[in-house]
Structures are given as structure tokens and as C-alpha cells.
Amino acid sequence: MEIVEKLNALSAKLQSIQATIQTEEATKNALVMPFIQSVLGYDVFDPHEVVPEFTCDVGTKKGEKIDYAILKNDEVQILIECKKLGETLNVNHASQLFRYFHVTTARISILTNGRHYKFFTDLDAVNKMDEKPFLELDLLDLDEHVIPELAKLTKTAFDLESIINSAEELKYISQIKKQLANEFTLPSEALVKLICARVYDGIVTQKVREQFTALTRKAMVQFLNDQINDRLKNALHGTSPALLAPAAAHTPAQAPTLAPSEASGDADGDHAVETTLEELEGFHIVRAIVRKVIDVKRVHYRDTQSYFGILVDDNNRRRICRLHFNRSQKYIGLMDEHRVEKRHPINGLDDIYAFTTALRNAAKQYTEESI
């Protein structure tokens, strides 16, 4: 899909220049205008399509300006308000969007800092911009589910009715996903109470509640591991090389135990380590890659506060790689010939496949060593 290539190009540009952008104007010129031009397909130099510093008097507010207005058939369709790269985006930053929204023909507004884009419409009340976005885009963490909806906003495929019809579902799916992510990190009291009521017959004391908080989180992570294993197993039976390299399948029962409480111990002495879903999926990708040269039952992980290590025989001296996913720029760390780690930047999980040969070579040396 062409829009994916353009987003990837803009994402790469952002990574290379983000340290040099210090002002809102620089954010607009280097990131927002290319987003409007390249990704959305509107000519930023044609005032019939894009009007910078768009002015519309609102009540007692005279001469107030919005950063960009995107037009179609001479009617305002999209309003864009920009903030400096790195600045946190919230509804307090959108006061001008709120005021302009109900006095123009726009049904879509965007609040952005060049990296994050929040898309709003008027689901809650007609001609009044919602306080919560129906769609969010992060250029440094692209979500494949966002792409088809973003495509509806492009010049060649602009479909306002379709956007509005799907906006409510998108809005609630986004909020539900955030709640689920929170539950995986630290199960809420309400969820723990629900689980206890369904699986525990005794009196729920404070001690029992604390115990089930840990057990619930552990069970959810293991459940997710099972789902990932099933997906990898199905992919291995398929023909798509984009998902996994061809290899013999294995059953989920062969997978090592992946509970964070059992895997977080490390020579570095880190405590209270939070193993993320992305790290777990990265582990499964690496394991699927190296299974061609080593028994996957020998492949384990140890999570620390600094990195996520993938090892052979649960031995720190037998490292396959390290995943550094604790910052906006992600890296995969591989050992060079001098056994010194070299970090390689990656944009997402799929980029791990680019290191297939290196990962297999790393795993293979421990197979030969153990013979």
C-alpha cells in the first residue's frame, strides 16, 4: 500500500531529525506539511486545497488563526492545529479547534506535534468537537489497524461518510485497547474481584486479593503467549514468508514457561521488571527464526530494566540477542566477533526478520558448542 511506504519514509525522516527540531514552526515545516502533502496527498502550496493560518472570527475572538485548513470543493473539511515536537497533546491544547469546529463546515480536526496525530469528529454532539479522539497515529510506532482509516482522509479517497460511520467504533476500540493494556500491566481491583468470584470459593481477604492480583496478571500473560504460539504455529503451516521463515511447526506445549515473575531475574539484579506484550512477541519471532538451527525448547528469555535478553539454555553467556524496547527508538542488540554488543535500530517487530541470518548464526554456535 502506497500510504504505508509514505508513512515509513516520514517516520524515518522523523527519527533522523527529531533532535534538531526545537520550535513549533520547525515542526510544521519539517513534519506536518510533509504529512499533509505526502501522506494525505493535498498540495500545501495550493490555497484551493490547503490554507495555512486559516482565519475565522469566532464570537468575541477576532482574527484568531488555526494552523491549517484543508479544503475540498471550496469547503473546509479538515482543521489542523500544531504544537512543537515533543509537547504533550491534550484537550487543553485544542481550544482553537473546539471554537472553529462549530463555525466551519469541517467534520474532522487533527491535533498534532509532528509525531503524534489525534483525529477528532463530532460523535457526542452535532457540530461540537469530541473531547476524545476517534483515531490516533504515532509515526514512531505505526499501527497497521490505523492505516485503512487514515487512507479515507486522503485527497484521492476522501470519504467523509465512511469516516464518520466508523469513527464511533474506532473511538471505543482505541479506549478498550488502552484499558486492556492497563489490565495486562496491573490488573484492576474490579477485574481481580471478578476473577475471584468465579474461581475462588473461600472468603476474599486482603491477602487473597493480593495473591490473585499476581495470579491474574501471570495467567493473562501466559494466555497471551498461548495465543501467539497458536498464531506462529498457523503461520508456519502457511506459505507467507513475510510472517515467518519456513520451518517445522511445534505445539504450544513445547514452549518454555514465560511468566515475568520467573523470567525477570538476572545477574544485573533488576527487580520489579515489567515484561511488555511487544517484548514477548519479539521473543516469539526470534524463536521462530532460530528454530531452524536449534531446538526451541532451549530458547529462553530474561527481562531486565535495561533490556530483554534472549538466551540459549537460560544462560547469560549464550546470548542470541537483546531487545531494547524501553524507549521510542527500538534496537536489536547482536554480538560482534569480539563478543561486544552492537545495537541496530528497528522501527517495529517486522524489522527483526531482516536479521534472520545473524540470529541463526548466533543460535547455531551454541548448538555446535554443546555437541
Image: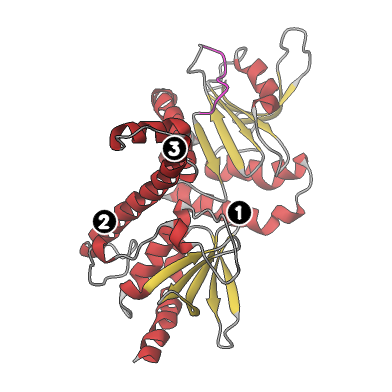
From the viewer's perspective, is 150 left or right of 36? left
What's the amino acid at mark 2? Answer: Asp
Foreground pick, 194 / 247:
194
Inter-mark Cα distance, 1 to 2: 29 Å
Q: Would residue 150 be visible to someone looking at this image?
A: no
Residue under circle 1?
Answer: 328
Q: Residue, x 47% and y 33% (percent of image)?
A: 189
The three-letter code of the residue at mark 3 reads: Arg
Q: Which residues are magenta?
A: 126-133
Q: Are marks 1 and 2 in contact (CB under 8 Å)?
A: no
Q: Which percent across, then down, holds residue 61?
A: 77, 12
Look at the image and say whether residue 111 sits in the magenta stretch: no
Nearest to the eye among marks 1 and 2: give it: 2
Task: Look at mark 3 in the image and give the residue it sits on.
Answer: 209
Residue situated in front as seen by the camera: 273 or 232? 273
Picture quarter containing residue 165?
Answer: top left
Q: CA distance from mark 3 to mark 2?
A: 31 Å
Q: Is residue 226 visible?
A: yes
> Pointer 1: residues within 10 angstroms few (<14), some, or many (20+)?
few
- Depth order, front residue of 235/221: 221
Q: Of the numbered discs in the image, which one, if any, rests on residue 230?
A: 2
